[in-house]
C-alpha cells in the first residue's frame, strides 16, 4: 500500500454505559464494545472485519460512519481527522462515506417511494435537482428497472432491496462504502448475486469497502485484507489469503474450524477445534487476553497484559499481525504479581 | 392427556420400515381470494436413525413441510392431498388430541429462535419437566425434575442442576437451543425435526449445537429431519439430502452424491453460489429470483433461471426419477446430468 | 417520472386513496402500481394506496364516518338549519311557549323557558364539536412537539421533558378543572393571560393543557424506536439534517398513532366539557353546550319533560361513539400489522 490510506482508524474505543437512565445516574458499569481498534483501508481496497456477535464489529462500522461518537481514538479520512467534525465539514465527509445495512426490510422507509429513498443522499447533500436524472441511472446500475423508482419498498424482495440500498449508497459517488452484513439476510443464490454486483461496482468505480461480516466464507470471497475481532479487540489481521491459509491466533483457528464445509468428504476429515462454553461478557471482560478463558493454549501470563498485535514475519506474510505471544513463541515472562 | 395412539414398534416388518413417510403431500395457501401451491406432491421417507436434510431457499416450502408434519400449518394453509404417516399412523386422519399427543411425544421440533420458543417466565428445568409430564403419565414432579436435569446435562449444559433454575433470558442463545434440544428428546421421539435450529447462532456455537444434536439423535435412535439453507450444515449432519425448489423436490439422494456430483441444474447452481473458505474464486450467482407461488411458471419451475432450459421444460413437468448409479439418487429434470 | 401526457398532480388525484400520509412530495410518484407481491412483507406499513380500501372494509368504521359527517354538517350549518335563536331574549312571547312537546313549529319541543330545543341541540353540538376538535388539535400540537423533541434528542432533554410530562400527569385533573373553571380570575393570579374557561376558547386551552400528555408519551416512544431503524441511520450517514429526518421519516411513520390519539381525544374532550358543564363549571351563557342542557334538565327524568334530557344526551352519545368508531377504523387501517 503506497501513499496515505483512505481511512485510518487509530486506537478506537467505544464504551456503552449499562442501564444508563435519563438522570445520568445509575450503574457505572460499561460494555467494552470496542477497545483499542486500529486499522487502515487504502483506496479501492476491501477490508473485512469479521467476528461473532458482540465482538464490536458493527459498533466499529457505526463509529466510522459517525453515527456514534467514539469514547477515545481517532478516525482519519483522506488525511482529515473526522472524529470531532460537525456541520458542513461532517456533511462533506459523509458524501464520501456511505453505508449499506444488513436488514433489507428496515433499510427503507415503508411510506416513501424507493426512488425518493435512493435519492435521499443527493437531497441531503443539496443536489435534489440531480435526482430525477440520476436515480434511473443508479437503478439500472444495480440491475433494476428504472421504473422501480415509483414503487414502495414492500413490493421488492430482500435481494432487490439490497440492490436499492447499494444504489442509494452510490448516489453521491462515495470513496468508501461501509457494508454492515450486507448479504447475511439473503438466500445463497441471491447472496451470490449481490456479492457479484458489489465486486463489479468496486472495480468500476474504484470503491473501497469496509465489509462487516460474521461469515468467514463470504469474507474470503470479497476481502483483500481481513481483521478478526474478538470482544472489542482485533486479534489477527493481514492479507486475506495469508490469514485463511495460515491462521495463527487460536481464536481465528477455532473460528475457521467451526465453519462446516459443503463438501461432505472434506467435512468429515477436516480438523475441528470446538470451543468450550460461551464467549465472556463484554461488560466484565477477562483481564489480559480476552480469549484466554476459552483458549486451549492459555498460560498464566495471558491474564497479565493485553497482547499487542505483532508482525508475524516477512515474505508472503507481510502485514500479517497476530495478538498472541504464546503462539508466536514470545510469551512474556510470568507476571510477578500473579 | 392420553398417550399417543401410536404403536411402539413399526407394524410393518423389516428394519427399513420408515418412521415418517410423506406420500404426495400437497399444501395450498389461500390469500385474498387466490390460491397458491406451496407444496406440490412431495414424497419422502425417513428410516430410524437416519438424518435427512431438507434444503432450498426461502419460499421453497421446506419449513411448510416441517410444519405440515407437526400439524402446525399456519392459518390460510391447508393440506390438499397426500398422506403423512408417522410410525404407521396417518397423521392427517388423526384426531386433534392424538396429534397433540404425538407432538412433543413421538415427534418433536426444534425451531430457529429458542428465545420465542421458551416461556420467559418459567425456569428452564421446569419447562423440560413439564414436557416430560405432559407426555408420560405417572411420572412424579420430583422424578420429572430429576430427569430434566439429567437431560440438560446430556445436551452439554455445564452445572446442569444449577442452570435448570435459570430463566431463559439468563442463558445465551446456544444454551437456550440446548434446552430446546433437551425438551425435544425428553420423550424419546422417533422423529426429530430441526428447523434452521442453528441459523441464528454464531459459528463456534453452531458447531457445538450441531454436535449436541447429532449425539442426541444417536442416543435416541430417532430419525432426524434437518431443515436448513446452509449446505455446510447439510454436509456436516445429513445422510441424505432433499433439495427443494418452488414446492417440489428437485433432487434427492445420499449427501455425498448430491453435494459432489449434483445432477439438477438448481443444485449445481446452489453449490456454485456458496462461497468457500478454501478458495478465493468468485461465487457464481443464479440469475433471477425464485417464482412467487402465485405465479408459478408452467412446466419446470426452475426453467426461468436455468441455463439448460428449452421448450420441453416449458411444456412438460419434469418427474422425480432415479438417476445414475447411486442408490436413492433421484432428479426431476429433463436435462439431468447435462452439461454443467 | 409522470405518465406521459398527464401532469403529475392530475395523476396523483386520479388514484383513489393514493394520497400519501406523508407531508413530503415524492419525486417519483408515477401513480403506476405494478408487481404487487403478496405475502412477502407482513411487517411493512401499508402504503397509502391500501389505506381507504382497508378502512372501507370495516362496516362500523364506515357507519361512524357517515354519522360524523352528518353531525359535522349539522353543526357547521346550524345557523342555517336551526329554526330559531337558541338563546333569544326571554320575552313574554317566548316564555309562553315553555314546555311544549314536539310540534311542527318545534320538532323536538321547547325547554322550560320556551326556547326551541332543536336549535339549542344544534348549537350545543356546535360548541361540543368545537371544544372537542379544538382540544384535540391543541393536545396533538403540544404532545407531538414535546414528544418528538424528547424522542429525537434523547438523553437529558428526554429526561427533562418526560419529567415535565409526568408532572402534568399526576395533577388531579378534575379538581384543577373545577378550581380553574370557577376561578373568577382566569389570569390565575396574574400569572397567565388566559381566556376565561366559561367561554369556548378558554375551555379548549384548559382541557388541552390537561390532555396532551399521552400524545407526548406515544410520540416519544415511536421516535425512540424509529430513530434506530436502518433507514434513519442511513439518512444520518448520508448527511441529512435532523429537521429533514424528523419531517420526512419519523413524523410520517408516526401518523398512525397520532391520528388515532386525535380521534379519541376529541371524544374525551367532549365528555369532559359535558361533565364540567353538568357540574356548572363548563361554558356559560350565552354559549350553549350539550352538557349544559343536560344539567338544566336533570330534574326532568321520569317526567313528561324527559325529552329535554334525552335529545342532547342522545346527540352527545352518538357524537362520541362516532369519533371512537372512526378512531378504531383508522387504527386498523393504518396499523402495519393488521391483516390486509
Image (cartoon, rainbow, N blue to C red):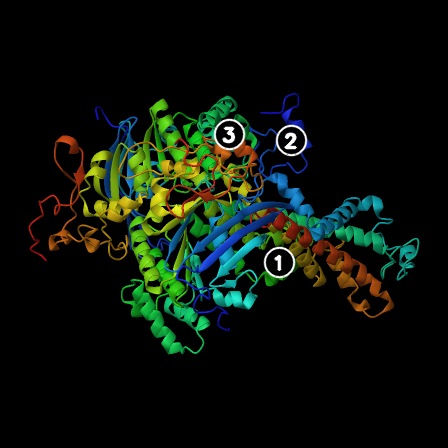
> Where is residue A170 drawn, in percent x and y?
41, 28
> Where is residue A22 drawn, in percent x and y?
40, 53
Q: Pointer 2: residues within 10 angstroms few (<14), some, or many (20+)? A: some
Question: Do callouts 1 and 3 mark residues in contact (Cβ within 8 Å)?
Answer: no
Q: Disc 2: which chain? A: C
> Where is residue B109 drawn, in percent x and y?
43, 59
Which residue, given by chain and number where applicable, does mark 3 sit on? B310
Q: Pointer 3: residues within 10 angstroms few (<14), some, or many (20+)? A: few
User: Disc 2 or disc 3, which is closer to the eye?
Assistant: 3
Q: Disc 3: which chain? A: B
Q: Which residue is found at the position 40% from the left and 38% from the top?
A: B263
Q: CA distance from mark 2 to mark 3?
A: 44 Å
State the SS at label 2: helix
Which residue, given by chain and number where applicable, does mark 1 sit on? C180
Relative height, residue B226 to residue B246 (above, below): below
Q: Which residue is found at the position 57% from the left and 44% from the top?
A: C255
Which residue, given by chain and number where applicable, does mark 2 sit on? C12
> Where is residue C172 drawn, in percent x and y?
57, 62
Q: Nearest the camera: A266 or A328?
A: A266
The image quadrant of residue C295 is: bottom right
Amino acid at each position: 500500500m503506497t501513499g496515505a490510506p483512505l481511512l485510518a482508524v487509530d486506537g478506537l474505543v467505544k464504551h456503552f454505559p449499562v442501564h444508563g437512565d435519563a438522570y445520568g445516574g445509575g450503574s457505572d458499569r460499561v460494555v467494552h464494545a470496542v477497545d483499542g481498534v486500529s486499522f487502515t483501508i487504502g483506496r479501492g481496497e476491501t477490508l473485512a472485519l469479521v467476528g461473532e456477535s458482540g465482538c464490536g464489529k458493527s459498533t466499529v462500522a457505526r463509529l466510522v460512519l459517525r453515527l456514534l461518537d467514539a469514547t477515545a481514538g481517532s478516525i482519519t479520512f483522506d488525511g482529515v481527522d473526522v472524529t470531532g467534525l460537525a456541520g458542513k465539514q461532517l456533511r462533506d465527509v459523509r458524501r464520501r462515506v456511505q453505508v449499506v445495512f444488513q436488514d433489507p426490510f428496515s433499510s427503507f422507509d415503508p411510506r416513501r417511494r424507493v426512488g425518493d429513498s435512493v435519492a435521499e443522499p443527493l437531497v441531503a447533500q443539496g443536489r435534489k435537482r440531480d435526482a430525477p436524472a440520476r436515480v434511473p441511472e443508479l437503478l439500472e446500475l444495480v440491475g433494476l428497472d428504472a421504473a422501480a423508482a415509483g414503487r414502495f419498498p414492500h413490493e421488492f424482495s430482500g435481494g432487490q432491496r439490497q440492490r436499492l440500498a447499494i444504489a442509494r449508497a452510490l448516489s453521491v459517488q462515495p470513496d468508501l462504502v461501509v457494508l454492515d452484513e450486507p448479504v447475511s439476510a439473503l438466500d445463497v443464490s441471491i447472496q451470490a448475486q449481490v456479492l457479484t454486483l458489489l465486486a463489479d461496482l468496486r472495480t468500476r468505480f474504484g470503491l473501497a469497502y469496509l465489509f462487516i461480516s460474521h461469515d468467514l466464507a463470504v469474507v474470503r470471497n470479497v476481502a483483500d485484507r481481513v481483521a478478526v475481532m474478538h470482544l472489542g479487540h482485533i486479534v489477527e489481521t493481514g492479507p486475506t489469503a495469508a490469514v485463511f491459509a495460515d491462521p495463527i491466533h487460536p481464536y481465528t483457528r477455532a473460528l475457521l474450524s467451526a465453519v462446516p464445509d459443503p463438501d461432505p468428504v472434506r467435512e468429515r476429515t477436516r480438523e475441528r477445534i470446538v470451543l468450550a462454553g460461551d464467549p465472556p461478557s463484554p461488560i466484565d471482560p477477562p483481564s489480559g487476553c480476552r480469549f484466554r478463558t476459552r483458549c486451549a493454549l492459555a498460560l498464566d501470563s495471558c491474564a497479565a497484559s493485553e497482547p499487542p498485535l505483532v508482525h508475524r514475519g516477512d515474505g508472503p506474510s507481510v502485514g500479517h499481525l497476530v495478538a498472541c505471544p504464546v503462539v508466536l513463541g514470545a510469551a512474556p515472562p510470568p507476571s510477578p504479581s500473579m | 392427556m392420553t398417550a399417543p395412539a401410536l404403536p411402539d414398534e413399526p407394524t410393518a416388518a423389516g428394519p427399513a420400515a420408515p418412521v415418517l413417510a410423506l406420500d404426495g403431500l400437497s399444501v395450498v395457501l389461500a390469500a385474498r381470494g387466490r390460491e397458491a401451491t406451496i407444496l406440490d406432491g412431495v414424497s419422502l421417507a425417513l428410516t430410524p436413525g437416519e438424518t435427512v436434510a431438507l434444503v432450498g431457499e426461502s419460499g421453497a416450502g421446506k419449513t411448510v413441510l416441517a410444519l405440515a408434519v407437526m400439524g402446525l400449518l399456519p392459518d390460510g394453509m391447508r393440506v390438499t392431498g397426500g398422506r403423512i404417516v408417522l410410525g404407521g399412523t396417518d397423521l392427517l386422519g388423526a384426531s386433534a388430541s392424538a396429534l397433540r399427543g404425538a407432538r412433543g411425544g413421538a415427534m418433536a421440533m426444534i425451531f430457529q429462535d429458542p428465545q420465542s420458543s421458551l416461556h420467559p417466565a418459567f425456569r428452564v428445568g421446569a419447562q423440560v419437566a413439564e414436557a416430560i409430564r405432559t407426555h408420560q403419565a405417572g411420572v412424579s414432579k420430583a422424578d420429572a425434575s430429576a430427569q430434566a436435569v439429567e437431560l440438560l446435562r446430556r445436551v452439554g449444559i455445564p452445572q446442569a442442576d444449577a442452570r435448570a433454575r435459570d430463566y431463559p433470558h439468563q442463558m445465551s442463545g446456544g444454551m437456550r437451543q440446548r434446552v430446546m434440544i433437551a425438551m425435544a428428546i425428553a420423550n424419546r421421539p422417533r422423529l426429530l425435526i430441526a428447523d434452521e435450529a442453528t441459523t441464528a447462532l454464531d459459528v463456534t456455537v453452531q458447531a457445538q449445537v450441531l454436535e449436541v444434536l447429532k449425539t442426541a439423535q444417536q442416543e435416541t435412535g430417532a430419525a432426524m429431519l434437518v431443515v436448513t439453507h446452509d449446505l455446510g450444515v447439510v454436509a456436516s449432519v445429513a445422510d441424505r439430502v432433499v433439495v427443494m425448489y418452488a414446492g417440489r423436490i428437485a433432487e434427492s439422494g445420499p449427501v455425498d452424491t448430491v453435494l459432489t456430483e449434483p445432477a439438477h441444474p438448481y443444485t449445481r447452481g446452489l453449490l456454485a453460489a456458496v462461497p468457500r473458505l478454501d478458495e478465493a474464486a468468485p461465487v457464481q450467482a443464479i440469475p433471477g429470483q425464485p417464482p412467487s407461488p402465485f405465479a408459478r411458471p408452467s412446466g419446470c419451475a426452475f426453467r426461468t433461471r436455468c441455463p439448460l432450459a428449452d421448450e420441453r421444460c416449458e411444456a412438460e413437468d419434469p418427474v422425480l426419477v432415479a438417476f445414475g448409479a447411486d442408490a436413492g439418487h433421484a432428479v426431476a429434470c429433463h436435462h439431468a446430468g447435462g452439461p454443467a | 417520472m409522470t405518465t406521459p401526457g398527464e401532469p403529475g398532480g392530475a395523476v396523483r388525484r386520479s388514484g383513489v386513496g393514493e394520497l400519501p400520509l406523508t407531508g413530503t412530495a415524492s419525486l417519483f410518484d408515477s401513480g403506476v402500481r405494478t408487481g404487487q407481491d403478496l405475502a412477502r412483507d407482513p411487517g411493512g406499513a401499508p402504503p397509502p394506496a391500501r389505506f381507504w380500501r382497508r378502512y372501507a372494509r370495516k362496516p362500523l368504521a364506515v357507519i361512524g364516518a357517515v354519522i360524523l359527517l352528518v353531525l359535522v354538517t349539522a353543526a357547521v350549518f346550524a345557523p342555517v338549519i336551526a329554526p330559531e335563536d337558541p338563546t333569544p331574549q326571554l320575552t313574554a312571547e317566548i316564555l309562553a311557549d315553555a314546555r311544549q312537546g314536539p310540534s311542527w313549529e318545534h320538532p323536538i319541543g321547547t325547554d322550560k323557558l320556551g326556547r326551541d330545543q332543536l336549535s339549542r341541540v344544534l348549537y350545543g353540538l356546535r360548541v361540543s364539536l368545537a371544544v372537542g376538535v379544538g382540544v384535540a388539535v391543541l393536545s396533538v400540537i403540544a404532545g407531538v412537539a414535546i414528544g418528538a423533541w424528547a424522542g429525537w434528542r434523547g438523553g437529558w432533554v428526554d429526561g427533562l421533558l418526560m419529567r415535565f410530562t409526568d408532572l402534568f400527569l399526576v395533577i388531579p385533573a378534575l379538581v384543577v378543572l373545577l378550581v380553574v373553571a370557577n376561578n373568577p380570575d382566569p389570569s390565575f393570579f396574574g400569572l397567565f393571560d388566559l381566556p376565561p374557561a366559561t367561554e369556548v376558547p378558554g375551555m379548549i386551552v384548559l382541557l388541552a393543557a390537561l390532555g396532551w400528555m399521552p400524545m407526548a408519551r406515544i410520540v416519544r416512544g415511536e421516535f425512540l424506536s424509529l430513530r434506530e431503524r436502518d433507514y434513519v441511520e442511513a439518512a444520518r450517514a448520508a448527511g441529512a439534517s435532523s429537521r429533514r429526518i424528523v419531517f420526512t421519516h419519523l413524523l410520517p411513520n408516526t401518523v398512525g398513532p397520532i391520528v388515532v390519539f386525535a380521534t379519541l381525544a376529541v371524544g374525551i374532550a367532549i365528555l369532559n366539557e359535558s361533565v364540567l358543564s353538568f357540574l356548572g363549571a363548563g361554558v356559560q351563557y350565552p354559549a350553549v353546550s350539550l352538557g349544559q342542557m343536560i344539567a338544566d334538565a336533570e330534574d326532568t327524568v321520569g317526567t313528561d319533560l324527559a325529552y329535554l334530557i334525552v335529545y342532547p344526551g342522545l346527540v352527545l352519545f352518538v357524537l362520541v361513539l362516532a369519533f371512537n368508531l372512526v378512531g378504531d377504523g383508522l387504527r386498523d387501517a393504518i396499523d402495519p400489522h393488521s391483516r390486509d
